[in-house]
Image: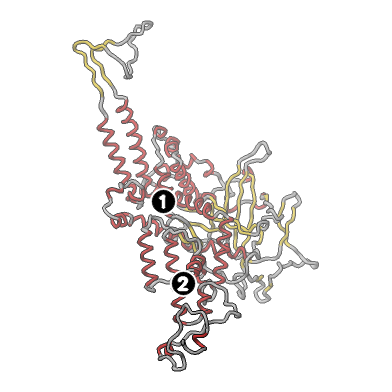
Amino acid sequence: MRLRELVIDAWSWINYKPAMADPHGPVHRAFPEINHSWVPEPDRRRLAVYKLLAAYDNNQAGQLAAVTGDHHGLERRELGDPSKLIDTTLGYLLGAEQTIVVPGADHAGNDKPSAGAAQAADLQERLRAWADKELWPLRIQQAERCAVRCGDGVFTLAWEPAKQRVLLRTFDPGFYFPEWDDGEQDSSEYPARVHFAWELPADPVRGLKARLRRITYELGAIGAATAPGVTEDGRAIREQVVGAEGDPVLTVGDTLDAVTGSVQRTYPWAPGRPSTTTCYLSDAEWLLEDLGAAHDLYSLPPNKAAYRVRSDGQVLDRLDLMVDFIPVVHVPNTIPDGGEHWGKSSLGTVLQLLDELAATDTDSASASATTGTPIVSLAGARLPIDRTTGQPLPVRVEAGTVWQLSDSGRMDALDTSAQLAELRQRIDHMLTRLAANTRLTTAGLGSLDPASVPSGYALQLALGPLDSLVGAMRLARAHKYQLLLRLVQRLHQAGQAWPAGESLPARLVWGAHTPTDRTTILADVVSGYGAGVFSLETAVRMLQEAGYPIDEVAEEIERIQKRAFDQAARLADATGDNAAVREYLQLPPADPGVLSVPLIPAQASQQPASPALPAELPPSGHTGGEGLTGPGPR
């Protein structure tokens, strides 16, 4: 590659492969679907990188190398190191579990909950119930594994009228094509238009030709109401609804601003703040034979589109979704550079090291073959003769083989065990280098001997790079999952399934990514809560994050308080209020028909006995009343 052809972008780490550096090179020719005319030119390099990383993940890098001209590519040994690297990174990223938390929800059961605590608890319960129905952990694993491998993952949200809930789906990033206006692309800016596009193969049995499907989300100004219609040639479209006098009709709830002439709408999550923006959804197919060189993904001919129809009969031709956002969330694997949108694959910076490891594995396999079945040279041996041809028969080294040698005969074997041992040492060295460069560490990859660790503190120091790696990856995703949960809440509000109101913040809490010393954490919680440094909510939350089987913090606190008799006794001594004690123990109010025993004041209990009372009381075993009312004993 000449210097004037040097390309520096989000995928520069792949430039060491000359075939990838050329946008028209053999790697791009190996994936013909990338070179179709509808694929935008700037996206072809990104799609080729996704394909290449998928080949490494599936142990097909050797096959790809053979396609690009490497004659020894099919002999390449691939033992699953890239796939293990992806799965290990994914496991540490996700942790033991993922929990949806709404701040303030844990305080809803307090005696005097803070403002909005009940609303936060209700939202948290709704989000968790929705997550169970939508297989939340499974969807996260699907998107995050793709993000770790390719550098990008994509979630989509859609309101399903039949199920009355939001559907959560994941897309391959190779189908994802965001579109910005000139000068507006930034990692923190949301695109105004998002496309998902892929090819549908021909189906001769059903009589279907090869097609291109494109789903488009686009933000635009609110317009007049539309309804499903049909063109003269039978294609389903949306038509504008007009009144009796031919004037456009607005959607119920929309208003027309007489000053600006724009249509305004008040969304349930923004009461009192009218908006002029909405999101339109289009889902259509085009025959590949109708697309020429002048048509790419962003300029497909609308007169050739065949729009799809939703389950409720709505034609997906700029269908107004009644929301002012695009229900798509892009999840980068790393924090993008300034002005960038795409993340970096966890395999990116160590891809050359993986090639070296595969090459060494291939050499090691060859050396082990010559070590297990050595090459033998014979001198002065009488070889068997083929009686038909009179030529010596091929000699093979097999168990039980005997050769008759002359007096000066000699047999030598080629010993390659030293080379095999050196190759194995090189493999161990490269695995250690791989653990260091990926920051997964040898302890994280499971190749560290536990007996070689002198103490738990030394192991904690060894896992330091892994902690920083997981922290950076979770930081890149923190805002994305907050955004996703906010969109889930608003889509349910738009579907009138959840109450209207301002959106409450919700976040995803990851589980511990490394084994924790639960005994130490328990001791810290006990001492901190006992000393009054921690609140009970904080203490229970610490135990939950440490891996103790606590499902709900509020429910666990309620169970603890129901059995906290020592604290209840101290509360009674401090206040003397029986009602407060019963409320603390989660008991119902006392029956007013039961008389309470008055407490003797402390000062009265310290005064001398009254002379009106008898000097001696009867023994505790006395059951009669004569000792109190009658004369003394005779």
40 vs 193, nearest the viewer: 193
Please identify the residue farthest to the front as the structure is shown. 634
Label 2 is placed on what type of residue? Phe
Quadrant in which the N terminus is drawn: top left
Image quadrant in which you'd find residue 255: bottom right
Q: Which residue is mark 2?
A: 565
Q: Earlier in the sequence, mark 2 or mark 1?
A: 1
| Viewer-proximal residue among 494 and 33 | 494
**Can the viewer see residue 185 in this picture?**
no
Going by the picture, which residue comes out furthest to the bottom? 611
Which element is circle 2 on? helix
- Left or right: where 72 falls relative to 596: left
Disc assigned to residue 89: 1
Q: Residue at x 38, y 59 (%)?
A: 518
Residue 534 in sight: yes
Near-viewer residue (103 or 141): 103
Q: Is residue 505 above or below residue 337?
A: below
Image vertical order of residue 522 relative to residue 307, above or below: below
Q: How many marks?
A: 2
Measuring from the top left, give residue 418's x and y in whole percent: 25, 32
- Relative to 160, is 586 on the left or the right? left
The foreground one among 19 and 160 is 160
Q: Which mark is residue 302?
A: none
- Residue shown at 47%/50% (left/top)? 145
Q: Position of residue 507 (x, y in %)?
A: 49, 64
* Residue 367, image x, y percentages: 31, 31
